[in-house]
Amino acid sequence: MMERSLAVTCPDISTHLAGTKKVQQELARPGVLERFFPGEPDVVDQNRATFAGLYTPDMGPEGDKTVSMALAKPDQFVLKPQREGGGKRTLALYFFLQWVH
């Protein structure tokens, strides 16, 4: 339903969206995987065990918490752009967060 074009796409829109950080972040929220695997707590646990932490730097309480965690332990965080397929990574995370914060 998302795609109207008959053109061959690679990846299809569903696969592309599933690979975005924002969708991955939503899937990592408590209760979301349970909707897709009702009554299968082992499957949920197996999937959740493969997740890396995804935290928003957006303005607001959740973003403030992320910035505080990253400032406290910058060696445990990687700042990646939303662009998929690589892109430049900001190595100076600590200084970037100081500037944003």
Image (spheres, rainbow, N blue to C red):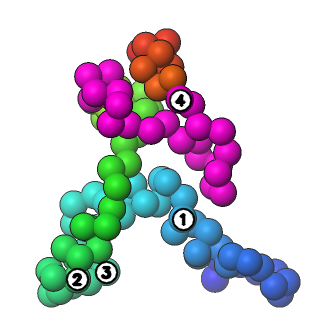
Q: Residues within 10 Å of mark 3 (few under 14, many from 20)?
A: few
- Residue 79 located left or right of residue 68: right
Name the N-terminal-most of marks 2 and 4.
Answer: 2
Question: Magenta stretch containing residue 45, yes or no?
Answer: no
Q: Name the residue under label 3.
A: 36
Residue flagged by tag 1: what amino acid is it?
Gly
Q: Residue at x 38, y 58 (%)?
A: 26
Q: Separation of disc 4 and disc 3 at Cα?
A: 36 Å
Q: Separation of disc 2 and disc 4 at Cα?
A: 35 Å
Q: Which percent across, then down, holds residue 34?
A: 23, 75
Q: Helix or strand or loop: what does disc 2 sit on?
A: helix
Q: Separation of disc 3 and disc 1 at Cα?
A: 17 Å
Name the N-terminal-most of marks 4 and 3.
Answer: 3
Does residue 61 sit above or below 56 in this rendering? above
Q: Which of 87 and 20 is in front in this view?
A: 87
Q: Which percent across, then down, holds residue 60?
A: 36, 28
Q: Mark 2 points at which residue?
A: 43
* Label 1 with label 2: CB-CB less than 8 Å: no
Q: Helix or strand or loop: what does disc 4 sit on?
A: loop
Q: Name the residue under label 1.
A: 19
Residue flagged by tag 4: what amino acid is it?
Leu
Q: Name the residue under label 4.
A: 91
